[in-house]
Image (cartoon, rainbow, N blue to C red):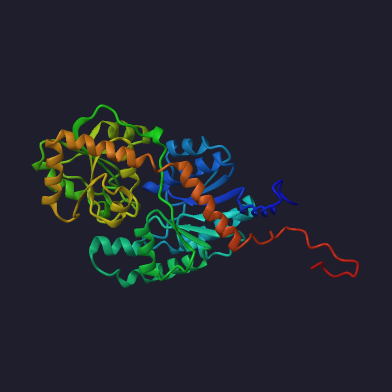
Amino acid sequence: MARGDGGPTPAAAAPRPRPGRVLMTADPHGGVWTYAIELAGALSRAGVATVLATMGGPLSDGARAAAAAIRGLELVEGAYRLEWMDDPWDDVAAAGDWLLDLEERTRPDLIHLNGYCHAALPFRAPRVVVAHACVLSWWRAVHRLPPPVRHDRYRARVAAGLRAAEAVVAPSAAMLSALSGEYGALGVGRGHVIPHARDRRRFAPAAKEAFVFAAGRLWDEAKNLAALEKVAPRLPWPVLVAGSDVAPGGVGRRTGESLCSLGWMSEGELSWWMGRAAIYAFPARYEPFGMSVLEAGLSGCALVLGDLPSLREVWRDAAVYVPADDPAALAGALDQLIRDAARRDALGALARRRAVRFSPRVMARRYLDVYAVALAARPPAPRRDSPPPSPTPCGTPCE
């Protein structure tokens, strides 16, 4: 067929493959759950259903309510230990059988794993692995030493999962580089960077008040909230900290008297406090993205962050950066912002403008692009209950 001007009609581009249903894993610890819910919600609005399989601990009532609010989402809870926990391997194996059974029952077009090891399972559907963090890069950043030999099994299992996946996603180029450094190059076209996102309507600035705020797992040395304990007595403002002080397995960490610990918070409570916090402090030693920092940015807080390549990549000139192991620099940066209201307000506005760019809609669109790459690389295998091919008149299957 020709166009009206006599020129040839360009061939229509073949439609990119797109999943109708995704089987996604998640855990209730830290930002992975928040990320999974944001992505599942955005995928739902794009017409993609999610089966969300959780492991690593029980969900809160609020988490279940958030899942129930997403159209087309099926929540399935498992009680298995995660691969980064102590001595997890029996549970990892049992969870693998559970996930294969889930695939048979729910028949997804794609497997989205927010972990590594299970990507090596014989799933029918192609696999996308998302690297939120890893034990080995965490160890190097926190301890400034190579990981000990007790993590060799973890290294081997993670490497096998990365090799098996059709695509690997990280929330920052820094995290993708760390993966390659620990486990070997991913290969051309297999690694992708997609930043996390938050709905801007969930966090917004309010009238700012005179306190420094921080949030995170108090038991996680990577968050380095202990640095705030050292500097809080030197500051003219109080330092308030939200987050769990009990690690998986029941090991706790008490905060010092210099900090005001508010404990674990629901999303609504966290949004209320962040909206009023003038400064958000996050002097992390290790952080592949920083979901809590994104929430603080949406809340219009002036950001004081650990000087990490990943955080500089995400926030650029919209934050103040300090070396994680330099309490004097942290104290000086916080004190300067406390005393300089104009700079504090300007940084808060910059952080808000930067944060709103991390949109769930854009995140979902980019994941659909990666899903298309994975589906093109390995179309789903026939299901075990698929009917056999129709015979030809000669009695042999059609080719």
What quarter of the picture does the C terminus occupy?
bottom right
Q: Position of residue 391 (x, y in %)?
A: 85, 65
Q: Is residue 254 found left or right of 195 in the rendered image?
A: left
To which quarter of the image does residue 380 belong? Answer: bottom right
Q: Position of residue 239 (x, y in %)?
A: 18, 39
Q: Is residue 118 found left or right of 47 in the rendered image?
A: left
On screen, residue 279 above or below 184: above
Pick the residue in front: 283 or 386: 283
Q: Is residue 45 visible?
A: yes
Pick the residue in front: 133 or 29: 133
Q: Is residue 195 found left or right of 93 in the rendered image?
A: left
Q: Position of residue 228 (x, y in %)?
A: 17, 46
Pick the residue in front: 119 or 282: 282
On screen, residue 360 above or below 150: above
Pick the residue in front: 188 or 71: 188
Give the residue drawn at x 18%, y 37%: 343
